Image (cartoon, rainbow, N blue to C red):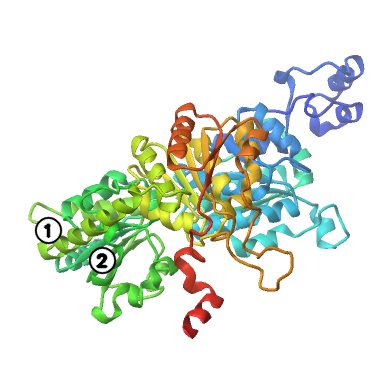
Amino acid sequence: MSSVRTDKEASTTLDDALKPKNRANDGDAVVLALKQPTEEASPAHETTIDGFHLVIDALKLNDIDTIFGLPGIPITDLTRMAQAEGLRVISFRHEQHAGNAAAAAGFLTQKPGICLTVSAPGFLNGLTALANATTNCFPMILISGSSEREIVDLQQGDYEEMDQLAIAKPLCKAAFRVLHAEDIGVGIARAIRSALSGRPGGVYLDLPAKLFAQTMDAEAGRRSLIKVVDPAPRQIPAPDAVKRALDLLKGAKKPLILLGKGAAYAQADADIRALVEKTGIPYLPMSMAKGLLPDTHAQSAAAARSYVLQEADVVMLVGARLNWLLSHGKGKTWGQDKGAKQFIQIDIAPTEIDSNVAIAAPVIGDIGSCVAALLAGVDAKWAKPPAEWTGAIAERKDKNLSKMAATLAARPSPMNFHSALSVIRDQVKARPDAIVVNEGANTLDFARSIVDMYEPRKRLDVGTWGIMGIGMGFAVAAAVVTDKPVIAIEGDSAFGFSGMEVETICRYNLPICIVVFNNNGVYRGTDVNGSGTADVAPTVFVKNARYDKLMEAFGGVGVNATTADELQKALAEAVASRRPTLINAVIDETAGTESGRITSLNPSTAKKTQQQ
């Protein structure tokens, strides 16, 4: 841990030497300044520490080793000093992508990812990632420099003047501002604890520019820092809640376990697998929970998703919410005409219970503790689900998988989504440690069901909001915090949101292979301008664009793949070489449907459907 600022970081002047608060012996300091104005003082004799180093030391004290951000006023020197003090500073081209990287790092490591931005516009750019992290329960801290309070409060027109704290508060789990150097340790400790405790989420920390130059006694500064102890303490479920859940499962004729990304974040992998296997209950993983058990596991019901959601009589949610991704637990998706269902829900937040439908057996606590408690109640006498239920699932799985296999085996020219994704599917099978990042419309929908995952926390995608633009930030974070190869499966529209970050990928020489599914437009490249003017339709891009050239411009490897064989060769080489690579995968421009599987959410499309 660094202790004090050096003369290189804050030049000593005669005025500085004359300030009693900055020197233990004013007379000696004046003599030193007069006799040796350019000589660097010995660290052993320095007695002050500044705000820059207090921030850095507070982060290091709490085992934070990486910062994602973008330098500029007033945090440029902070990034330089952080790097010099041993923190890894990953500098992006846009703050939103740095924020997305911090969020993904938080999900993967269970430590709050740190995003550092400049004030006002830079802060605003980071807010999308902060809000998305909060919605998805990813621990993240957005730290932004800001204008001085006295000017902002009187609206006197400071540089990038903005009341950032007020703007951030509605969009995150907690927000704090630090005005005095002696409070930096408390501010960072509160941010860390808020990000990790209970349901994780995003936190905003506001650091006005004047704070960084403030100095205080070095020893007092060290004492002001806080090592956060047990920021996410275990929350043990009530025994009667566990018994209620187990009794409900025992009485089920068609039980189902549904795993959400909260289960993946919990890192209770062994117990979750043991609970599934000892109970014999079929399970269905949400997209970011894929790999908690291999997608090829005999109890996986993913290939019979529609059937099990409609037919199950008791459903246990583990780290999953009955939001729009699960049709709010209602309607045709859940077989509303097939009788009432009963739900067991494991969640750390009691306020989540009954948010859409009645929960018969809430189990409140951290997922690891809850799963362990349930597992302790499953003994050798536990009766497996009826063969009628598991057999019906297996029958539908086999039928659907056989149908899928035939589709994936086809090699049309040009490629379609299935033929291209079958190549990626094979590569992930060969390298199950590779991390898949996925965004798009059709590209996302098809990849979820086609690309099998074998290990936990190896799939990152658009999450609860389904937003575009997470791709390159998530990919960078995955490569930085795991050092594993990353395969980013990108729709051409989705890639456009963060494509400039290929320079970042090349700059840090990260083992990332981006596969852009290029079908010339949003959803597809065949829409026509109905007005007859020269402009192309709003959903159409430049025909036959070469995204691979963008990667080549920054020294990476670019490949234009028009066949499945070309894609297979390029992808295998990229993963093996660990060189930054972008493959422009040319897809049939007629492939794809509007909005993928969420067409019903498009008001225009819904209206057309009603008229037909």
Q: Amino acid at mark 2?
A: Val
Residue plotted at (23% across, 71% down): 311
Q: Residue at x 42, y 69 (%)?
A: 351
Residue 378 falls in which quadrant of the image?
bottom left
Whole-Å distance between the Cαs marked 2 and 1? 17 Å
**For marks 2 and 1 on the same chain, the one whose residue lies earlier in the sequence:** 2
Q: Which residue is mark 2?
A: 308
In the image, residue 231 lies at what x, y percent? 47, 47
- Residue 32: mark: none
Q: Which residue sits furthest bottom? A: 611
Residue under the image location 75 percent in, 35 percent down: 77
Residue type beneath disc 1: Lys
Lateral position of residue 106 relative to residue 280, left or right: right
Q: Is residue 112 visible?
A: no
Label 2 close to label 1 by CB (< 8 Å): no
Quadrant of the drawing holding the N terminus: top right
Which of the two residues, 481 or 347, is positioned nearer the viewer here? 481
Q: Secondary structure at mark 2?
A: helix
Helix, strand or loop at disc 1?
loop
Q: Residues within 10 Å of mark 2 (few under 14, many from 20)?
A: many
Q: Which residue is mark 1?
A: 384
- Residue 112 % position (x, y): 53, 45
Mark 1 Cα within 10 Å, few/some/many (few <14, many 20+)?
Answer: some
Closest to the camera, between mark 2 and mark 1, is 2
| Quarter of the image where one finds residue 350 | bottom left
Question: Does 400 appear above or below 106?
Answer: below
In the foreground, 223 or 266: 266
> In the image, is 212 to the left or to the right of 444?
right
At x 27%, y 61%, the residue is 304
